[in-house]
Image (cartoon, helix red, strand yellow):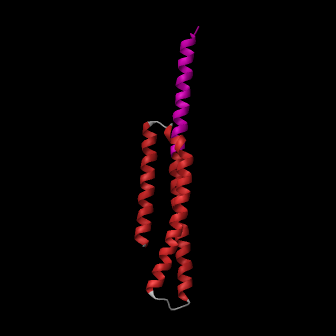
């Protein structure tokens, strides 16, 4: 006849496994959302670049004007992306705080990679 203590230990282990699995899944979702956000930003950047090319193709525009337009478009895209990132980070923060240390480290690395990629895109297009 099993004792109550053993049953409680088993239940606690099962709950710990479930929470660990949930935290791991949440970390993967966070990384996936970061990748999707980055891809969406790339698509928007390309669309804006094509739109700018079409606008400039029909008229003689000095290079300075084209750079200003590109800079303005890029800043707007960056502002929109910043809002999405802030909403995502705010929504995910309570979940990430409950993750095991390894999952928290993964989330931190994903955020750093996202920020580096974003900085690279902004600085290369400027």
Measuring from the top left, give residue 69's x and y in whole percent.
Answer: 50, 79
Q: Which residues are magenta?
A: 1-27
Considering the whole magenta stretch, tell me its main secondary structure: helix
Measuring from the top left, give residue 13's x and y in whole percent.
Answer: 52, 24
> Looking at the image, which residue is at 55% across and 51% down?
88
Measuring from the top left, give residue 70's x and y in whole percent.
Answer: 49, 76
> Looking at the image, which residue is at 45% across and 52% down?
111
> Looking at the image, which residue is at 53% across and 52% down?
32
- The single residue placed furthest to the top in the displayed view is 1
Q: Is residue 108 above or below residue 17?
A: below
> Looking at the image, which residue is at 46% across and 36% down?
100
Measuring from the top left, give residue 60's x and y in whole percent.
Answer: 50, 92
In-front residue for pair 57/95? 95
Left or right, 44 with respect to 111, comes to right
Q: Is residue 24 above or below residue 50?
A: above
Can residue 63 be found in the magenta stretch? no
**Which quadrant: the N terminus?**
top right
Q: Picture quarter containing residue 83? A: bottom right
């Amino acid at each position: 006849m099993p004792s109550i203590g053993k049953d409680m230990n088993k239940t606690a282990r099962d709950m710990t496994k479930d929470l660990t699995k949930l935290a791991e899944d949440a970390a993967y979702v966070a990384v996936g959302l970061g990748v999707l956000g980055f891809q969406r930003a790339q698509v928007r950047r390309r669309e804006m670049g094509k739109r700018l090319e079409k606008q400039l193709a029909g008229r003689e525009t000095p290079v300075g004007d084209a750079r200003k337009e590109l800079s303005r478009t890029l800043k707007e895209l960056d502002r929109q992306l910043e809002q999405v990132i802030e909403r995502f980070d705010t929504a995910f923060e309570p979940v990430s705080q409950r993750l095991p240390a390894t999952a928290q480290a993964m989330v931190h690395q994903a955020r750093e990679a996202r920020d580096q990629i974003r900085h690279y895109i902004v600085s290369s297009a400027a």
